[in-house]
Structures are given as structure tokens and as C-alpha cells.
Amino acid sequence: MYKRLGFLALVLVVVLAVGVSISSASSPTSPSSGLTVQITSAISADTVTYSITLVNDTSMDIGNIYLAGLVPTGTSFVKATATPPGSWFRGFEVESAVWLSDKVPAKGKQGPFSYQVKIIGPIGSAHAWVHWAAPSEGTAVSAATKATKYVGSEACAKCHAKKYNNFRVAGHGYKLRTAADAMKAPLPLPEGYTWDDISYVIGGYKWKARYMDKQGYIITTAAGKPGKNQYNMMTGTWVDYHPGEMKKYDCGRCHTTGYSSEGHQDGLPGIVGTWAFPGVQCEACHGPGGDHIAGKAKMVVDESAALCGKCHIRGKATEIPASGGFIRHHEQYNEFLASPHRALSCVACHSPHKKAEFSIEAACSTCHSGANAAFTGSQMQKVGVTCTDCHMPKASKSAVKFGPYEGDVMTHLFEINIDPKAKMFTDDGNLAKGYLTLDFACLQCHKDKDVQWAANYAQGIHSLGKK
């Protein structure tokens, strides 16, 4: 099933400082030694990336560890990395990667060791194996991890061209891009940097762009000084984001496709985890498509709000985090669950494939016919006010605020509390209360008025001006 390249297999031989008895088992852990081998694998369009981490659960060092690479049939070796680079990476022998470590420290870990193989032909899954033993016993335990093949959004386009074309201009795919892709977009760079200094760009679609250096850390300085490292798209300004910190990129769970929390993408120590593709691609919502393309399985079509809620959430689902007088950005699921629409699904109103501004496929009047009838012909309707202007104002902030009650992301709370004494946020400002107040619903437009003025009109606002 597997071919030999340099070394027999992905072999881990552990020589312990004390006598150890290891029994055969189908598990990555030897209960008697306390050494755990954690394995993950992720598959992109044509490359399998294996990531192996060694964990010592004992109170003593485990030493003389040797690791070499196994390559599945139907693949060829690409490259190998270890983290931290150079600490115990010995190099390459023939086409295998080899690591040698003096010790895994007590109650510590080493790794990830990462190696990539290129898929020669179509395969539905890939396995990573570890065989390890105390030489005196000559026995071994083995473990396998399976990753179904991710094929990329372009593969989906062959049969789903319309959905793919809508997806291409929407924001999901741009949550994370390689520098090679991002440099084709009209994006500036922090002062003092060139594209040769960048590994990935975070965002850069509508609200803001942040940049990662060649080690995978988020850039937090510009021109040699802390700050001015986040570019705000709507204002063309540079602002501070964790200025001067050494900040790892740990957002892959929601910003990438085929994410695993183990390892470091591309062997970059500043990146937490690995992925099959950067950005939120088709398979981030529908699952890996290798078996589907091969005609072996149907794709997942999950229309529940909970699917969107896996990423459009911050903190607890039962709370709505806030900061600086606004709801914190992109936590629509938190808001949605607190709203009168909580029994619906997101796709009841939105096409998930389209750009947000053009994704509405069910108008408010579809369900709210009475309110729509009252509103039609009213003074507010005649001057161009829409339902969403009042019930979905920009009460959230991603990058910038345009006024005391206007951020840059529309809310999904919908319900308006017309009591002029109502407070939208808790006293400490850290949570929203689950409804809109008149300042956000009305004063984004009526900037010279106050909530008491707004309350005088709120009760009959839908039919204002009609006889």
C-alpha cells in the first residue's frame, strides 16, 4: 500500500531513559510511556499536508527521538518543515524528511513536524501513519488519520457556474489570501514593506486589510514604529491594530477551508493551524468535495442558521458583545438569536452565494404585509426610507464609525424599543441588550434631533403623513 522513499515508513523510535513496555494497539498513545503522537492531515487541490506533534505527558524528559517520512502510494514527496525551524530538524535523506530530537521535555511537546506530498492521481482520502516502539520489545503501535479530499472552489465551477460566479464577487473567499493573489488587488502595503515581505493578507475586500509577515505573524508596525498597520477600506486611512505586539494569526477556523488546529500552515510559526485553502471557499460550508466529484457522495446542503452561526458569532450565543458604543463586528448569529426572526434560517432571506448587498431574495413585505401596506405611500416611503434603514441600521462596527450612531455593518436585531429611556447597552458597555434603541434607528439620519423627538413620532411611523 505504501512505497519506500529513503526510509521504510513514518517511523518514530523512542529510546526512553527508563525501562518501558509497549504493547501493540491501534492508538497514537502508549499508556505506559506517556508519549502521545498527534497526527492531522489536510488535502488541498493536489497536495496532502501531514502534521505530527509529540506530547510528553510524564514528569520526565523522553529522549533520542527519531522521525522519518512515509509517502502514500499515488503521491510524491514535496517538502518538509519543523517548528521551531532548525531546533531539531536534521534535513533530508533521499526523498524522506528526517527529524532528530534530543528530548521531548517533561509535560511538554515538540512539533509540529510537517511534510507534504503531491497527489499524482485522484484519491478519495489520505492516511498518515506513525509506527513507534521501544527497541527492546520490537513491538509497535500505529495510528491513522483520514482527510477527505478538498478540491477547491474552481472545481465546483465546472457544474455550478452561476453560483460560483456569484461567489467570486462576494466577500467570503477574500477573508484570507496569499500574497501572490492579494497583490493583484488594489491594496496598499504598510509603510516600509514590499510584497516580498508578505505571506498572507487578511481581508481587504470591503472593510479593512491586515497583513502577515514571512513568518506568519500579523504585522503590527509600519516604518519601524508600532501601529499604522491596518488599512481601512472605506476611509483610506491606516490605523493601529495591536501596535507593536508579536501577534499570531489564530483566525483560521473561520477564515479558511479545511482547517485543522494542529500544526503551522506552510511551516510558518506565526500561524496557528493548517488549512486546505485560504478564505471561505465553497467547501467551508458544503464539506470536502472529492467524493462528490468522483460520483461517490452528495454534497452537504445545510440551510440552518446554525451553519452560518459557526463563524458569524462572537463569544456566547446568548450574549451580544459590544465595545465603544457599537455591537462588535460580524456576530450576526448572536443578534439573530435575540431577534424576532430567530425561528427562521439565514437563507430564508439571503442567497448565501451572493454579495451581501445583493443577496436578499425575500423582501420584508413577504412576511410583513400589514406593515408594508401601512408604509406604502407614507411620508417616509416617499422620501426613500426603507424597512432596513430603521430596523437594520449600522449598529455594528468592523473598521470605522461614521457618527455616534452609525458604524459600518448592518445589525440583525430588527426589533426597535421606542421607549426614549431605553438603553441599548449594559452599563459597562460590553453587551448589547437584544433590541435597537431610537438613537440608532432614527438619529443616523436625523442627526440634529434627539431620542425624545424620535419617540414622539415612533408609534405611528409606518403610516406617517397618510390621510
Image (spheres, helix red, strand yellow):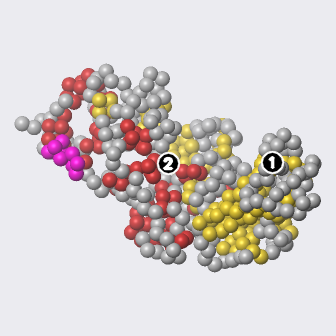
Residue visible at 61% across and 76% down? 122
Inspect this view and state whether residue 152 appears.
no
Residue 458: percent from left, percent from top: 22, 30
Q: Is residue 405 left or right of residue 248?
A: left
Residue at 38%, 42% in the rendered image: 336
Task: Give the quadrant of the N terminus.
Answer: bottom right
Segment tinted magenta in the rendering: 365-373
Q: Nearer the viewer, residue 440 or 27?
A: 27
Residue 372 is a magenta residue: yes
Q: Amino acid at mark 1?
A: Gly
In the rendering, at what x and y percent does residue 254 appear? Answer: 54, 51
Give the number of the mark in front: 1 or 2.
Answer: 1
Residue 322, given in percent of the width and then of the height, sits at: 46, 32
Task: Please tell me whether residue 95 is drawn above or below residue 182 in the rendered image.
Answer: below
As drawn, the label of residue 34 is: 1
In which quadrant will I find the C terminus?
A: top left
Query: What residue is disc 2 on?
Result: 311
Extreme residue in the left direction: 467
Between 33 and 247, which is closer to the camera in this rendering?
Answer: 33
Mark closest to the chain's N terminus, 1 or 2: 1
Asked if the stretch drawn in magenta spans residue 447, the answer is no
Considering depth in this image, is 3 or 281 the residue closer to the camera?
A: 3
Q: Secondary structure at mark 2?
A: loop
* Residue beneath the point at 85% across and 59% down: 133
Label 2 amino acid? Answer: Cys
Number of residues whose C-alpha sits closer than 10 Å to that of mark 1, classed few (under 14), some (14–19) or many (20 or more): some
User: Measured along the vertical axis of the image, is residue 377 above or below residue 418?
Assistant: below
Residue 374 in the image, given as x and y percentages of width and height:
14, 41
- How far separated are the C-alphas under marks 1 and 2? 35 Å
Q: In what element is the residue under mark 1?
A: loop
Residue 229 seen in the current view: yes
